[in-house]
Image (cartoon, coloured by chain):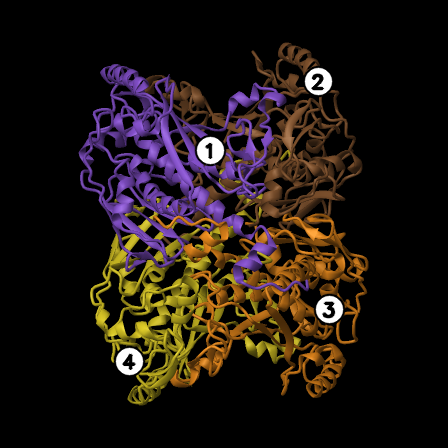
Chain colours: A orange, B yellow, C purple, D brown
Amino acid sequence: MSGSTYGKLFSFTTWGESHGSALGVVVDGCPAGIPLRPEDIQVFLNRRKPGQSKYTTKRSEEDTVEILSGVFEGRTTGTPISMVVFNKDQRSRDYSEIASYYRPGHADYCFDAKYGFRDYRGGGRSSGRETIGRVAAGAIAMKILHALDIEVSAYAEEIGGIRCSSIDLSLCAKNPFYMPDLEAAKKVQAAAEKQMADKDSMGGVIACIVKNMPVGIGEPVFEKLDANLSKALFSIGAVKAVEIGDGFCSARSSGSENNDSFLPPKQKGGPLQKASNHAGGILGGMSDGSDIFLRAAIKPTPSIAKEQQTVTCTGEPVTVSIRGRHDPIIVPRAVVVVEAMTAVTLVDMLFAGMTAKMDSICRFFGRSNSDI
Amino acid sequence: MSGSTYGKLFSFTTWGESHGSALGVVVDGCPAGIPLRPEDIQVFLNRRKPGQSKYTTKRSEEDTVEILSGVFEGRTTGTPISMVVFNKDQRSRDYSEIASYYRPGHADYCFDAKYGFRDYRGGGRSSGRETIGRVAAGAIAMKILHALDIEVSAYAEEIGGIRCSSIDLSLCAKNPFYMPDLEAAKKVQAAAEKQMADKDSMGGVIACIVKNMPVGIGEPVFEKLDANLSKALFSIGAVKAVEIGDGFCSARSSGSENNDSFLPPKQKGGPLQKASNHAGGILGGMSDGSDIFLRAAIKPTPSIAKEQQTVTCTGEPVTVSIRGRHDPIIVPRAVVVVEAMTAVTLVDMLFAGMTAKMDSICRFFGRSNSDI
Amino acid sequence: MSGSTYGKLFSFTTWGESHGSALGVVVDGCPAGIPLRPEDIQVFLNRRKPGQSKYTTKRSEEDTVEILSGVFEGRTTGTPISMVVFNKDQRSRDYSEIASYYRPGHADYCFDAKYGFRDYRGGGRSSGRETIGRVAAGAIAMKILHALDIEVSAYAEEIGGIRCSSIDLSLCAKNPFYMPDLEAAKKVQAAAEKQMADKDSMGGVIACIVKNMPVGIGEPVFEKLDANLSKALFSIGAVKAVEIGDGFCSARSSGSENNDSFLPPKQKGGPLQKASNHAGGILGGMSDGSDIFLRAAIKPTPSIAKEQQTVTCTGEPVTVSIRGRHDPIIVPRAVVVVEAMTAVTLVDMLFAGMTAKMDSICRFFGRSNSDI
Amino acid sequence: MSGSTYGKLFSFTTWGESHGSALGVVVDGCPAGIPLRPEDIQVFLNRRKPGQSKYTTKRSEEDTVEILSGVFEGRTTGTPISMVVFNKDQRSRDYSEIASYYRPGHADYCFDAKYGFRDYRGGGRSSGRETIGRVAAGAIAMKILHALDIEVSAYAEEIGGIRCSSIDLSLCAKNPFYMPDLEAAKKVQAAAEKQMADKDSMGGVIACIVKNMPVGIGEPVFEKLDANLSKALFSIGAVKAVEIGDGFCSARSSGSENNDSFLPPKQKGGPLQKASNHAGGILGGMSDGSDIFLRAAIKPTPSIAKEQQTVTCTGEPVTVSIRGRHDPIIVPRAVVVVEAMTAVTLVDMLFAGMTAKMDSICRFFGRSNSDI
């Protein structure tokens, strides 16, 4: 079945393999009238590209995006937007050995079983480079959110078990780990050096905050906002858990502690305020007007040079050491992917929410027959 | 937008409010030829019904299901299966006061903002009774899985911070908390007594194990098995987090520890085995043949008799004490809901996986033109 | 695969067989705030029910609809609306013989091949009674259209080759054929008497006009308005062709004749007018502001008492004469079904059209950040 | 809303404008293991490209397709297949005048109303070049059908009112009109010369035959095979009507004439035969095993050099003469588009039909637990 399209109203289809000639995305359902230039997409893609620090893969790619359709005289036309990035630095010889065995922690075995064979070069379709399409689509979604005064910011909350003690988002760009706490970043650097010397890898936790969502976005009971956000995040490779608000801590709390009391709105007619935000901004699957807070747990990079046991494609035991240019830590490059997937989900859900009330619909079309 | 339908190939639409005349579900896409009687559905519904212990709501409902279509001479016909349960013991007078304020931790405020008004009786559409439809659909999905030799079992792994130390699924039915460890259940009983005396509530964690899934089920990159399972679980009211396998523990692990080494299959041609299962049975978004393990964190019941601060529908501060018949702990009754949502997702994904390989498709239709 | 749900944003799922206990529909995605009572649905259902004239089936059904959810204090809540009609006058003995052979012109053989067996009673799932759910959903869609000042009117344009020469919609309810021309109706009556004496049946053409659609509704390139309308109409049993505007006559015309010249709008800022309407109100798959005109060709009722050749379920030739209570002409009862399917499609497409322009979306949410 | 994606299980998204840099398609859900080379796609694209005869547009494009993903070592991998064609011969100066008025019979006005502005160059997104993506996707679908021994053949049955008297598909490639009757083609040539001298255009009717479909494909009640085929055909620009089998002639027939009597199968266990095929191979929305026969009516090309009345974008009356390189007759180039849309629909429906019976599903997965 087709599984490479995300979204119902604002939707996009990604394509491309790590070692194919190009990767890209087609965004469908983007409203017309949004100013859009390649630079707007590039700034997001640059946050995910490889070779930016010694702690991420050494593969060197410019990842320059081209917009091939859907834009006229600098604005989106409402027609599909096709964006492409051409691969430049693929080294297929690094991967030829891998064709003969199943790498632990990777999708090799599953792909083989599912399709009968696989493109073994790099991660094929499950490579991190597949996220190029998501981030490009996310950049457009971010424009839409920006037009609606909604902010989305993700950061590395924890790497290798080392947590941030304070959150200052302006510090994220000032360290190679995209952490909002430079002290924590320093400790992570030391831990990372050690892991790399050990030919091993580390995981982490990415947090994401959404500010200023309208109240009531999300479609009960199955297209809830948190349900769709979790699906979006879990679709990112290496994600093994998602929390909304207090997440697992809620499970260990009591009703009286976990409930967020409502308070009167700041301005008359504005959204209610809350005395706390254990809910993480989502109640009953809909936005409650507070900041939305979510977390994604990222497992450690499976491709490590350290020796591992596994089997060949014919089922024989074998010891392997995976060479090639792999990220010791995926987390820093995955932060923008979490932002992108959050953004596209928010846009799709905002669009879905426009048909909730008959009077809004009448107002939208400038028609109102009260005799019904 | 329509949000009450789940699934693409095996799909179902739930309907009904807590205090309306009935609740139900229409299952669409169920294959023909499956033996089905109301008793098959009833056994699952009985696990979720209220009034079963002092630790769950005292509302008394038989929740007897009727099958109104889609079955002929005892077998499914392939046409939509409509199942209905009529509400008997709704007490609207318990809820009239609630119409005037927004209960903390509930969806009241969000529904009002989204739709302009709400059915304030009981939880309305966000009531736990909405899960009747899901469990009925899940019962049919469980039949399909059973025909394919796939098992799904959920249990309460933790309640109020008290964890099970051992797992013996046969013990679940022998305590009111559906825990597979009687020692833990006893401690939970004591803790529950205390919470109820305090007019407060508790949350917990439900775990679910799937055995014997074929390898390669899940549709990269957006319709991954874990992505869809998480969406299914998050759609259940009160869920605030989902983990697959080691979940957040993966984030604190290293690649060498977290990777599961592959081992030769038990029988020639069978699925590979693994030395460990940190992945929880899913790699690259597809089943890897090992047991699938997932967890859902359930927040404590928001409706408590203990006094809380909130606001009225006109934004004035007010102190409330929520009466009515509410579950001090939702977890025991939610276990079957977790099983149901897991089951319907597995079926939908198994169906989706049938078109992965051209040769399988040719075999299915009994046609094969090799000249392509 | 699930095939009993129609629509993406305003969607509904029908269920029920001709000889099962009930039939119904669940409407999902209906906006909140619409006044709705069973009488509103009943008036549409009454136009399709059997036993209304000697020219339609003699089965006697009240077809009284009950609304089981989704309405509170007389208005839609935005939650799913479940509507049910209980079968009363099913005579299963009329159909027992039919179980042994495949009726020509019916879906019996296809159902058997597809599902392995079939509910042979009445038409099972392919019975005309299945349209009850569609008409009920259509009644709600008509309310939405009415609130938006959009009118949908269908009528029998032709029966048994006898065409209406004039169109006066007020005459439709004054003859048993729902024709807007009493002269034509009289001729049809004579032809119908003859066909019935011959134990045979007749087909016809149903036309439908939509007035006052906003311009630009329809989603190129695959979710065009005409594409979706045709799918909706073809889903009605017995439909064998659909035309938009001049339809097949366009194929025999020239560009200069077929093009509709645009004219200035009636009022400044209003929709353009056209000198003609060969296009039938749809250009490039979008509404152009003129009346939308479409036609559906209905084949003659396949169940006739006249002798026919066919085969038994084991492939043996057999001569049959189909008894039971069948419509000599389906067309009059199908008119409201054409209206219903047109209405639900228009609503779904109107909703889809709300996200076409960024500035409208900003206006809808009351937010506008021009710095994008 | 997103409207540029077609299909549920085998799906594709087209993108690109007539005068943008490129056009393309991403095919998602194509099974793995199908041999695929650019030449396989090119042979279909060559049947639609411009400049092939004096009766079609003089724009000169090679329309060479490149496959950028989804193929490895010559076979489809099961991952998305991105195909691109770069525009070479776009002449934007031919269209600058058109920006100021709304061409009759075109989507200009609708696009402007829908999106607020439009890419006026060529037909923009509603240009015939948009069909490049469809035909490329259709080429892949044809491979799948070929593997299943299913044939799809379309031809021009009628142009400018001149019908074929005989059908010999081998003659289609021997005349510029793709007609299976050289006599008719000669008459059309004369008529075409006259129309072109008149600066006018002609329409026609394209017929399509499908041979050897399995019985029972199609998903009642809304995802019927004919319903989806009609939607697919109506999505092609310029289509104004669709017929299945006898179409409108059925409406004027009687039940005894229109019913197709069933006959015993040719071989034991094979599909039933029928004495006639008025139904066009589809009954109750499902394939009945006979040849599927459908027709699409194509309106005459709206862009003509002959003078027409219309209005400017500001609503002022204006007389125009549309220059540029336009097809006097679209029909010959649209034949392969009808084949393509038919093919992709058949594949999607064949895939959908795989989950109709529980025993087939058990057989597919090689598992069968009879204790259900």
> Quarter of the image containing the N terminus of chain B?
bottom left
The kind of residue tagged 1 is Asp
User: Can you give x and y, in whole percent of width and height, for residue B41 in the image?
Assistant: 29, 59
Chain holding disc 2 = D
Q: Secondary structure at mark 4?
A: loop
User: Can you give x and y, in whole percent of width and height, for residue C86 in the image?
Assistant: 22, 45
Q: CA distance from mark 3 to mark 4?
A: 51 Å
Q: Secondary structure at mark 2?
A: helix
Q: Residue at x 43, y 46 (%)?
A: C148
Tags 2 and 3 touching, CB below 8 Å: no
Label 1 Cα neighbours within 10 Å, binned few <14 / some 14-19 / many ≥20: many
User: Can you give x and y, in whole percent of width and height, for residue C255 in the image?
Assistant: 62, 23
Q: Secondary structure at mark 1?
A: helix
Chain holding disc 1 = D
The kind of residue tagged 4 is Tyr
Tags 2 and 4 touching, CB below 8 Å: no
* Labels 1 and 3 share a subunit: no
Residue bearing mark 4 = B55
Residue nearest the viewer, comparing D38 with B12? B12
Residue bearing mark 1 = D226
* Labels 3 and 4 share a subunit: no
Q: How many marks?
A: 4
Residue bearing mark 2 = D196
The kind of residue tagged 2 is Met
Chain holding disc 3 = A
2 or 1: tag closer to the N-terminus: 2
Residue bearing mark 3 = A47
